[in-house]
Image (cartoon, grey):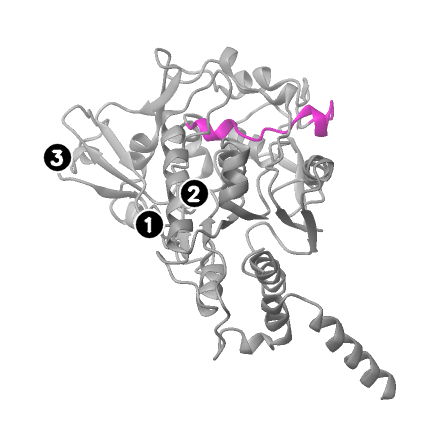
Amino acid sequence: MAMNTAFLGLLQLLLLLLPPSLRDYLWAAPSDHGVGQQLQVYHPIILSAGISCPVLEARLTDAYTPSLPRCGELKGKGWFPLWNSKQDLVDHDYVSCFEEQMSLVFDPVTNDYRNRPGVETRVPGFGSAYGFSYKDDSCPFCCNVKLRDELETLGYRDGDTLFGAPYDIRHAPPQPGHPSKVYSDYFARVKDLVQNASAMNGNKPVIFIGHSFGGKLILDFVNSTPLPWRKKFIKHLVLLSPTPPTGFMEVVTNLASGPSCIHFDAAPHLALRTMWWSFASSLLSLPSPMVFAHEPLIVTKHRNYSAYHYPDFLAAVGFSMEGMLPSTKLALPTNLSVEAPMVPTTYLSGVGIQTIKQVVFWDGDFDVYPENVYGDGDGVVNWNSVLVFANELKRQHSSENILFKFIKIPNVTHSEIAIQDNSLKIIMAEILEANS
């Protein structure tokens, strides 16, 4: 009993050494968080969520020629939600129209992707933390909803101290030799959002919080800005299981079998595979040779495909199609380099979850679902890729004496890192420490 008392006394003394906001949060019981508690808000926060979370609206003009009569029923009727509710698409027999109107076309003249003729699109809710939503009722706390709610109980307010930067899930940030008008415009809007959020809050720099693909986009945005600008306007990056440029196997399985992030009970993943191929984002974060080397990623009885064989693999699944990016123009990860943001960064990732590391299409038939071989990770991102990416970020930050924290959270999945109580408490503690 005396030992327990002494330990509790020591713990209280240690808590007193922490920054006030972090100490207050950790000292409170879980049920007390947000109940009668109003912590001081120090820095504005901008949220970005995973690839299944942004909403997309569409408008059909006279130039649109539908493949089915029902797909043209909304022509000339203004903006409508194209990607917002799975159930609405199923109830209105609109899944095949959705596939057609979501698809992109590669334009060899501009060397960029665009919508199909007669289809205009936009992402609503830019600037709002409410600009992200899950597309059915199966996960009400996905898309940073629980994290957003937790921040609001601590005093953050949407449009005042809390913001969001939803994006078009189909496009990819510009790369050398691969322009992207959509993302060049998006990054300009994010830059304005950062500056406006800072000005509204006494010129304090912002904290970015990004999950999954949203974390990747935050990194890409930050790295697109001049170093003096980011040092002035960015206080901290909090990355929650970001999809790493070093790659992960789900990118391969999505190309082979259709997207896991866009699916309907009424339509198998394979039914949306051609639509997914048309997205520039479908080719991001292919497993890199710098991590996966010559390890067979795709196994068939006639040949195997490693991270060095993507053109052959894509040809085998039928990726080379009219109107799509030619395989000769693919930005493959062979000579990948990792660029650190060079601002204070906290990287949190789950570990200890069964994660696909190899797929087997033994008969070479890519129109059937494969057998999977598993390794370690967060259920989506492979742990070996996380480690290579995090260690390289740490190396670059350490060379300039810039804070970089890497926190692994055992037994939490990619999708639940900002939902599960234990991991959410760790995330909130890191956010509050960054706020100090």
Label placed on residue 76: 3
Q: CA distance from mark 2 to mark 1?
A: 11 Å
Position above or below: 98 against 113: below
**Residue 59, quarter of picture:** top left
Question: Which quarter shows the N terminus?
Answer: bottom right
- The amino acid type of the residue labelled 2 equals His
Question: Against 326, is 93 above or below?
Answer: below
The label on residue 218 is none
Residue toward you, 65 or 221: 221
Marks 1 and 3 sit apart, C-alpha to C-alpha, by: 21 Å
Q: Please report whichever mark, 2 or 1, sits nearer to the chain's N-terminal start.
A: 1
Tell me the quadrant of the picture where the C terminus can be found. Answer: bottom right
Q: Is residue 134 visible?
A: no
Residue that numbered label 2 is attached to: 263
Q: Residues within 10 Å of mark 2 (few under 14, many from 20)?
A: some
- Residue assigned mark 1: 85
Q: Amino acid at mark 1?
A: Ser
Q: Which residues are magenta?
A: 279-296
Residue 174: x percent and y percent? 46, 25
In what element is the residue under mark 3? Answer: loop
> Which percent across, then down, holds residue 323?
37, 16
Going from N to C along the chain, the mark reached first, 3 or 2, is 3
Which is closer to the viewer, label 3 or label 2?
3
Task: Identify the residue at the far bottom of this view.
Answer: 1
Whether the magenta-drawn stretch holds residue 117 is answered as no
What secondary structure is marked by label 2?
loop
**Residue sitting farthest toward the right:** 3
Q: Are marks 2 and 1 in contact (CB under 8 Å)?
A: no
| SS class, disc 1 | loop
Mark 1 or 3, closer to the camera = 3
Q: What is the x, y in percent for residue 433? A: 61, 60
Is residue 311 visible in the rendered structure shown here?
yes
